[in-house]
Image: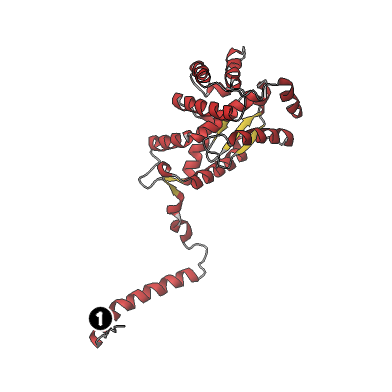
Amino acid sequence: MSWKYFSVNDLIKRRRWLYPLTSIVVAISLCLGTALPSPAIDWFPILIRGAQVLQLSNISERQEVELGRQMNSQIVGSEVKLSRNPEINLYVEEIGQRLVQYSDRPNLKYTFQVVDNDSVNAFATLGGFVYVHTGLLKTAENEAELASVMAHEIGHIGGKHLLKQMRQRAVASGVASAAGLDRNQAVGIGVELALNRPRSRGDEFDADRRGLKTLSRAGYAQSGMVSFMQKLLQSKQSVPTFLSTHPGTGDRITALKRAINEQPSNGRAGLDKTVYRSNLNALR
């Protein structure tokens, strides 16, 4: 072992910078350890501010799920009314979980919720949150049709379409900085887009493609996705909410038929109308 010796002059030089450093450390300790009066600056939000800024172009799955939870709290708290019917909620949850295991992101923890609203609609946010309106449940003729819509929304999550739109909106509106986007702003943008977004043609084709694969792998009849869109388009009523936010429906039906012809499936699950109606008895 070697030893290093210091002269008196060396020690004096070292103390010149040691004393100021010690003073700074003591000052910080006193500030953190002393109870400050209420008007004092709250340093904690400033210290963690960096953790509240997100880079949406490089977001982790954990951050995505957390954003989805925060969006869900806002949506459920002020935007929609959830169904309190335990039978219907369980039925939709079971269909959803059956689909999830055959989706593009089977390891993601999905949450399926029924919205008490007679409009024909369904939507998804981030991190596995899917919402289905009671109006859509009543409009579908069988479980395969309902499952096709849910698979489509799962497809949006698989393709991270909302996340892409959030990035685009943040940049276009000028709220994204070089450091990223504030978490609260991200949540607000995400909620607005999830509820009112004019979905792009490309995203809808992609969600259809992903959804059809998920539907087929889960054993449901592929025809359910086509028949549900056709039924709504042929309805004499006004265009339902579900389709008004999904452009190019006629072209999508054509693309789905082509995909089914190219990769047909033997799945026939979910076509029994009587069984489906019996499962929805609790809605009456």
Q: Residue at x 44, y 44 (%)?
A: 59
| Residue 26 coordinates in the image, percent (x, y) | 41, 75
Above or below, 184 against 231 in this view is below
Q: Residue at x 60, y 17 (%)?
A: 227
The answer to which image quadrant residue 47 occupies is bottom left
Q: Is residue 33 left or right of residue 80?
A: left
Above or below, 4 against 246 in this view is below
Q: Residue at x 45, y 23 (%)?
A: 201
Identify the amino acid type marked 1: Lys
Q: Is residue 71 left or right of residue 41?
A: right
Q: Nearer the viewer, residue 132 or 191?
A: 132
Q: Nearer the viewer, residue 16 or 232?
A: 232
| Residue 117 coordinates in the image, percent (x, y) | 65, 28
Which residue in the protein does label 1 denote? 13
- Residue 119 visible within the image: no
Question: For numbered disc 1, what is the local secondary structure?
Answer: helix
Q: Quadrant of the C terminus?
A: top right
The answer to which image quadrant residue 22 occupies is bottom left
| Residue 226 coordinates in the image, percent (x, y) | 57, 18
Q: Is residue 179 left or right of residue 147?
A: left
Q: Quadrant of the N terminus?
A: bottom left
- Residue 43 visible within the image: yes
| Residue 258 coordinates in the image, percent (x, y) | 49, 17
Q: Nearer the viewer, residue 32 or 68?
A: 68
